[in-house]
């Protein structure tokens, strides 16, 4: 890749969403599709022009000027809003027309993406597209979707955005209050996607966790963040602290018991404790419980010294708040290590009756491991073999195969 | 939050001829999708349905199925929680089998005791 291409890619990553949203704020006569096309065209024009004449002193400004001219032409074609851009020079929007709590364009867009008519998955997709500025291919890879699938979702979302002017309108104060929970969920899901193990040790995944942390910190720094924002931040920091220890030297997955705890980042854990402390005082959200569980893990001296009874109590409370079979699985594991073996197996066997959970590789992996610990090798092998058929990810397959090999030795 | 029933419709004649492998693959895909619903705290239960059953009306027990409208028979259901019908429909839209066009989902608000 040549230097010009690199520069254009870098700008694309940092400025695409910003330019699109600025165009939208310029004129209500430009819809999202048009705005995206115009920005896209301007980047292509930049690539051609800069290869010929070199990269200008202010590359972003160059692209934006081209963008603006293209937009102007587009609007003139429609013979409408002829004079719209005449007085406008650098300030992209009029603060008098667009007041609001947001100083940061990224946060404004984030709250626009949190429109309550969209599902969390769609909100995550458009946030990754317009706020984090990822390309469709990258989104597809991250969310384990096909490029076609992401395109279809974006197409539907765009229709809705156009019909309901979702990205045009800044959320008002009331909407901000109701949408902040949705925004938290989006950030949480983005972090989760980055944290998921199914893709192994890829750089893009760590970046995704960083993006989630940055968005949450921007919320905390603005007037909008609340105790839930702090709890979410603590939860993500506790998990980020363990990031490097989750993989062995050759990139293989390591479970909690195998992880080298000296690799956990003490600075991040300290910071996370600080934010957990800040999150006190309001009603406890699911992030509070999850952060508290992560806290107990991060501050335990060893796997054996972990406060499993406290962890299982927290899971129990979390389940009261939000019943969820996938959390129940973790609850059962905590129960087992807390010495409550019978209720642990009872819960796990109950989950096996669940049509979707029974197909879930982690349920069978957990059953395999616990049966192995109980000395029932035959049962362990049965569950592990089932697990192997339930995942197509090489990292996960290796992880399970390693457990089988270790057990059969 | 309101509850919504996803009525999953597929071509039962096609389903009937699926190999074990094919069926398993579909279940895995659905399981991953359900996992993503559960991550956002929206999942409220659900399961696939057998292809055959009984169809009962005033006259008699009519058939063992696959049902007459096999081209779009009900093959399963899922209950989710969402803010509104738009959001619920947008959930359904993210199902990989819907995106691929092998499955349709009818989204119906469930009327709780208070609303009924």
Image: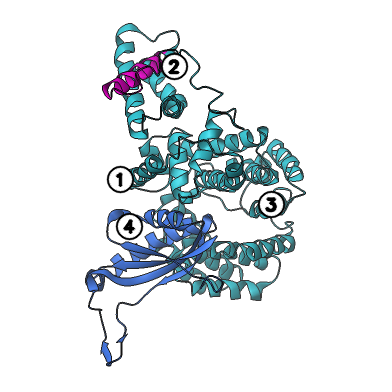
Chain colours: A cyan, B blue
CA distance for labels 3 and 4: 35 Å
User: In x, y percent, where is residue A347?
Assistant: 59, 72
**Above or below, B84 relative to A278:** below
| SS category of the residue bearing label 4 | helix
User: In x, y percent, where is residue A390?
Assistant: 41, 62
Q: Residue at x 36, y 33 (%)?
A: A31
Q: Is residue A270 visible?
A: yes
CA distance for labels 2 and 1: 30 Å
User: What residue did someone put label 3 on?
Assistant: A288
| SS category of the residue bearing label 1 | helix
Q: Are marks 2 and 1 on the same chain?
A: yes
| Mark 3 surroundings within 10 Å by alpha-carbon count, few (fewer than 14), some (14 through 19), many (20 or more) | many
Magenta part of the chain: A62-83
User: What residue did someone put label 2 on?
Assistant: A60
Mark nearer the N terminus (3 vs 1): 1
Indicate the quadrant where residue A223 lies: top right
User: In x, y percent, where is residue A64?
Assistant: 41, 17
Query: Magenta region, mostly helix, strand or loop?
Result: helix
């Amino acid at each position: 890749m040549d230097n010009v291409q690199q520069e254009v890619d870098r700008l694309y990553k940092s400025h695409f969403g910003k330019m699109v949203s600025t165009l939208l704020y310029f004129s209500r006569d430009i819809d999202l599709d048009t705005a995206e096309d115009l920005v896209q065209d301007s980047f292509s024009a930049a690539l051609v022009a800069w290869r010929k004449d070199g990269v200008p002193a202010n590359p972003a400004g160059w692209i934006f000027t081209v963008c603006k001219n293209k937009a102007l032409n587009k609007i003139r074609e429609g013979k409408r809003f002829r004079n719209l851009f005449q007085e406008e020079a650098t300030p992209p929007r009029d603060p008098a027309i667009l007041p609001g709590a947001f100083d940061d364009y990224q946060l404004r867009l984030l709250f626009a993406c949190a429109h309550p008519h969209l599902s969390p998955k769609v909100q995550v997709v458009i946030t990754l597209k317009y706020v984090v500025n990822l390309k469709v291919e990258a989104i597809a890879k991250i969310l384990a979707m096909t490029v076609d699938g992401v395109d279809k979702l974006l197409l539907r979302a765009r229709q809705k955005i156009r019909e309901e002017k979702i990205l045009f309108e800044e959320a008002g104060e009331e909407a901000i209050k109701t949408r902040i929970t949705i925004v938290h969920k989006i950030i949480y899901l983005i972090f989760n996607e980055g944290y998921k193990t199914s893709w192994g040790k890829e750089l893009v995944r760590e970046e995704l966790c960083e993006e989630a942390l940055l968005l949450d910190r921007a919320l905390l720094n603005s007037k909008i963040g609340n105790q839930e924002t702090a709890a979410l931040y603590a939860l993500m920091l506790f998990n980020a602290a363990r990031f490097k220890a989750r993989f062995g030297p050759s990139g293989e997955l390591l479970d909690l018991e195998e992880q080298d705890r000296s690799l956990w980042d003490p600075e991040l854990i300290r910071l996370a404790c600080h934010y957990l402390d800040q999150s006190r005082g309001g009603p406890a959200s699911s992030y509070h419980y999850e952060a508290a569980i992560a806290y107990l893990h991060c501050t335990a001296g060893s796997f054996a010294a972990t406060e499993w009874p406290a962890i299982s109590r927290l899971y129990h409370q979390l389940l009261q708040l939000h019943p969820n079979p996938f959390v129940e699985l973790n609850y059962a594991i905590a129960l087992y290590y807390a010495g409550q073996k019978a209720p642990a197996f009872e819960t796990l066997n109950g989950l096996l009756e669940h049509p979707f959970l029974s197909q879930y590789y982690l349920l069978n992996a957990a059953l395999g491991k616990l049966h192995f610990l109980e000395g029932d090798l035959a049962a362990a092998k049965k569950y592990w073999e089932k697990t192997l058929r339930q995942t197509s990810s090489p990292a996960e397959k290796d992880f399970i195969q390693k457990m089988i090999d270790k057990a059969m030795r | 939050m309101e509850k919504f029933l996803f009525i999953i419709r597929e071509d039962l004649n096609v389903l009937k001829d699926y190999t074990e492998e094919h069926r398993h693959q579909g279940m895995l895909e659905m399981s991953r999708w359900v996992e993503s619903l559960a991550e956002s705290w929206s999942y409220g239960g659900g399961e696939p349905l057998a292809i055959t059953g009984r169809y009962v009306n005033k006259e008699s027990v009519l058939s063992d199925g696959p049902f007459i409208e096999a081209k779009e028979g009900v093959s399963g259901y899922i209950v989710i929680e969402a803010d509104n019908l738009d959001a619920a429909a947008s959930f359904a839209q993210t199902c990989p089998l819907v995106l691929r066009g092998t499955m349709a989902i009818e989204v119906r608000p469930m009327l709780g005791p208070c609303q009924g």
